[in-house]
Image (spheres, rainbow, N blue to C red):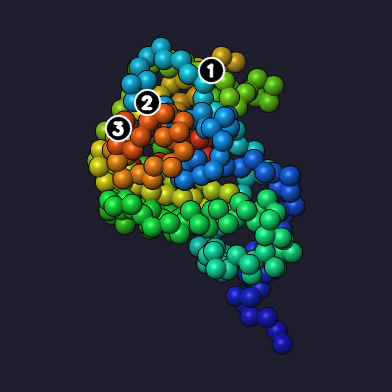
Amino acid sequence: MASSPSSCSLLFHLLLLIQFCSSRENDENHITIYGKNKVQDFDPALKVFFHVTDLHIGKKMPIYFAKNDPSTTPRLLTKEQSDSIPFSSSKLPYLLDLLSLTKDSPQAKAMDQTLKQCELEPTPGETRFCATSLESMLDLTREVLGMVKLKVLTTNIHNLTESGYTLLQGYTFLKEPSEIQVPDMVACHTMAYPYAVYYCHAQKGYNRAFKISLGGENGNRIDAIAVCHMDTSKWDRDHVAFRVLGVQPGTSPVCHFLPADNIMWIPSV
């Protein structure tokens, strides 16, 4: 009996999963820093959080900025393609069986963490969703921000070279940080998955966004986007940011830089 179009589409896109799994067999170091995690505080990739009082020209701090490798970066699928692939924790055993992956493999653990993160209930006043296609990201962002013209903000790494770039290095604030004056915003963070998945969230309350010009000790220049969450009283007290900054929920704002592959959506004025 011939396969249905949807079955063919699913099998075709599962090849992406196989490619992902073979290319990341030895990758056990991926972490997600925007939720509750069991990572160790000494992980260099956690050097993205800072205090709101750090926002001034001349501030020096170590910061971790990952660089993107287009050859290994998961691609964003179309809505039709992503809709043909199950995206649910309940379907993970099915996917792992098709891929001949054990549940204890690094790839399976990464997929499981992403699916669970995407299925978490939002905190009071928060909107969150996971987008598996550009179409779904735009549609869901407009549900949050309204039917307005959207503008995308990202962190840009300049004069990037293989020999002269260090993921974690000391940076200096070259200019006074410039605040982005918008009433609402949606931040979308990349997640570990075979194809591009973005965890997006918006929090009602007093959040502030900034453009920050940074100069690295190795000569790198970065135009960074940063977000400061001014009210963290409803955050999970196990959130990794509290451990990194040494604060408790609701006692201090939490600021963080956006990696270069993250996206902030704001209304265009």
Q: Which residue matches tag 1?
A: 170
Do the residues bearing badges 1 and 3 touch, measured as CB atoms within 8 Å?
no
What amino acid type should be assigned to the residue bearing mark 1? Gly
Disc assigned to residue 251: 3
Which of disc 1 and disc 2 is earlier in sequence?
2
Question: In 3D space, how far apart are the residues under numbered discs 2 and 1 (Cα atoms)?
Answer: 16 Å
Q: Secondary structure at mark 3?
A: loop
**Dot 1 crowding, Cα within 10 Å, few <14, some 14–19, many 20+:** some
Which residue does the numbered mark 2 point to in the structure image? 51
- The quarter of the displayed image where residue 164 is located: top right
The foreground one among 260 and 96 is 96
In the image, farthest residue toward the top: 58
Q: Residues within 10 Å of mark 2 (few under 14, many from 20)?
A: some
Residue type at mark 2: give it: His
Whichever of callouts 1 and 3 sits on the residue coming sooner in the sequence is 1
Please tell me whether mark 1 or mark 3 is closer to you in this view.
3
Whole-percent x, y for residue 263 in the image: 45, 42
Q: Position of residue 218 (x, y in %)?
A: 60, 15
Q: Quadrant of the C terminus?
A: top left
Q: Label 3 is placed on what type of residue?
A: Thr
Residue 30 lies, with reference to residue 8, above or below; the image says above
